[in-house]
Amino acid sequence: MWDWEFTISILPLLLEGLKITLIATFLAFGFAVVIGFLLAIARRSSVKILSLPVKAFIEFVRSTPLLAQLFFIFYVFPKFGLVLTPLVAGVLGLGLHYSTYLSEVYRSGIDSIPRGQWEAAKALNFSKARTWISIIIPQAVPPIIPVMGNYLIGMFKDTPVLSAITLVELLQTAKIIGAQSFRYLEPITMVGVIFLILSYVSSLGVQWLELRLNQR
Amino acid sequence: MSEIVTETSNNGIQNSEPIVRYQKVSKSFGDIEVIKELDLDVAPAEKIGIIGPSGSGKTTLIRMLMTLEKPTSGTIEVDGELLWHKRVNGNLVPADEKHLRRVRSKVGMIFQQFNLFPHMTVLRNVTEAPIHVLGLSREEAEERAITMLEKVGLKDKLDHYPRQLSGGQQQRVAIARALVMNPKIMLFDEVTSALDPELVEEVLAVIKEIALEGNMTMLLVTHEMQFAREIADRIVFISDGRIIEQGPPEEIFENPKHERTRNFLRRFNKNN
Ligand SMILES: Nc1ncnc2c1ncn2[C@@H]1O[C@H](COP(=O)(O)OP(=O)(O)OP(=O)(O)O)[C@@H](O)[C@H]1O
Ligand SMILES: [Mg+2]
């Protein structure tokens, strides 16, 4: 049943798809890392007209399905004149979705900094920006790195949903191969195997990071 | 110099403009008023020991001067300038961040829990603010920092992290970190109460040395009565958000006029 020769022959195509999957993952993650941080800061702000809308936005994004958000960005934005390629729409949708989760992670990291650190910074007359750069971020970020790593893996495993907005990533590539060759077993199985290997290896990496950070 | 004769006149520090002036300062947390229309003038270079029962508002009083708590009403002046307000066309308006930072630069504070930056070495704890707040070069900041760390007896710990130091050593680093900013006014909030008893003396010795140098204005909230007596020019006894009694240490400790001061000192002596 299983055809090894066929499997090997489709590998280059699948790896092309994997490349798109990885590009989408890392771009979206980079976007989520930055936007998530801004959301976390805005949400902590004492300026209510900033913090309340941000809070509502985070709630909204977290309680609606990623697929619906992607459809909105890819199929509805053009109605308002914003036409995006599948990759850009995918990165935007996935990144925005995960930025709301990461903002909560940042928040837990920031909240874990004792009040005395903020007060010492103020007593030394640090500016707000300098307080973040020198005192808060260097202490808040290391403990949350493993959690962020797990979100990166989760995001990677969510990328097949981008095939719904026509991005030819790994799963979509496999589907196309299947449709053309009438053989679905090998391509789809290989997609599973590739995801399994990469997720497993990365989660080992996260565990290693966690150990290292705990030793400090 | 001026017509202002403060209540410190009986300490030999007279006729100078106060460097700190609380006027009708009140502070509430929710419905609870913890400082009640308090007035206090502090002369330049004066050392004030602030004593009083737990919860009487001592910490809140000095935290307002460090801009860590905002007064509910009243004004605080530092070195002739309003701290929490600005004067615009003769009206008082809330100070902006720029104004706060300028006036705040004259004040430093040492905390009960040290509040060192745990991710930085001793040297970096002391140089970070001179470099990024005062704008000194790294070399200049390190030179100054090492001088201060030498003064507090920790010149050999430059590369240590706070967690590698004893509480007494950590607190001395915190003192060096505050001193290097060269504030005119230094606030101490029970700086030895988190320390093991055998480490208290080394920290008090450093503070005493700073006090003896003379020119720094110091407000010390303390439960170390003997220490307060040795270094303070004036003792201020606070209870329930008000100054109940103040005067030279001998007077307050040996001959308190007020019933509440007597009770406090009696209870205090019994417990210690
Ligand atoms: N951030 C805050 N929120 C609410 N209440 C507060 C806050 N800070 C202080 N208080 C209350 O204000 C009162 C005065 O507190 P403060 O810490 O100034 O007292 P203290 O004289 O320093 O006491 P202690 O000797 O125990 O340190 C207390 O009743 C305290 O519970
Ligand atoms: Mg206190």
Image (tube, rainbow, N blue to C red):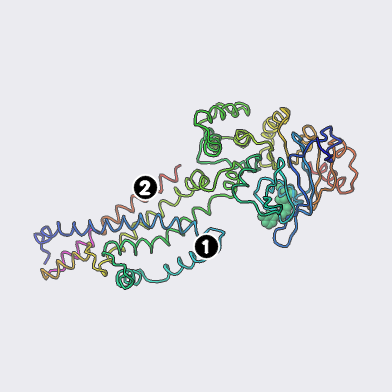
Up-down: is B154 above or below A212? Answer: above
Q: Which residue is tagged 2?
A: A208
Q: Quadrant of the C terminus of chain A?
A: top left
Q: Position of residue A204 (x, y in %)?
A: 33, 51
Residue A45 among magenta residues? no
Is the C-beta of the residue carrying label 1 under 8 Å from the nearest atom of ligand 1?
Answer: no
Cα separation, mark 1 vs mark 2, equals 36 Å
Q: Which residue is tagged 1?
A: A51
Question: Which quarter of the picture shows residue B188?
Answer: top right
Extreme residue in the front direction: B89
Under circle 1, the secondary element is: helix
**Magenta region:** A183-194
Same chain for labels 1 and 2? Say yes or no. yes
Q: Main secondary structure of the magenta part?
A: helix
Under circle 2, the secondary element is: helix
Residue under mark 1: which chain is it in? Answer: A
Residue A191 among magenta residues? yes
> For the residue marked with disc 1, what is the amino acid?
Ser
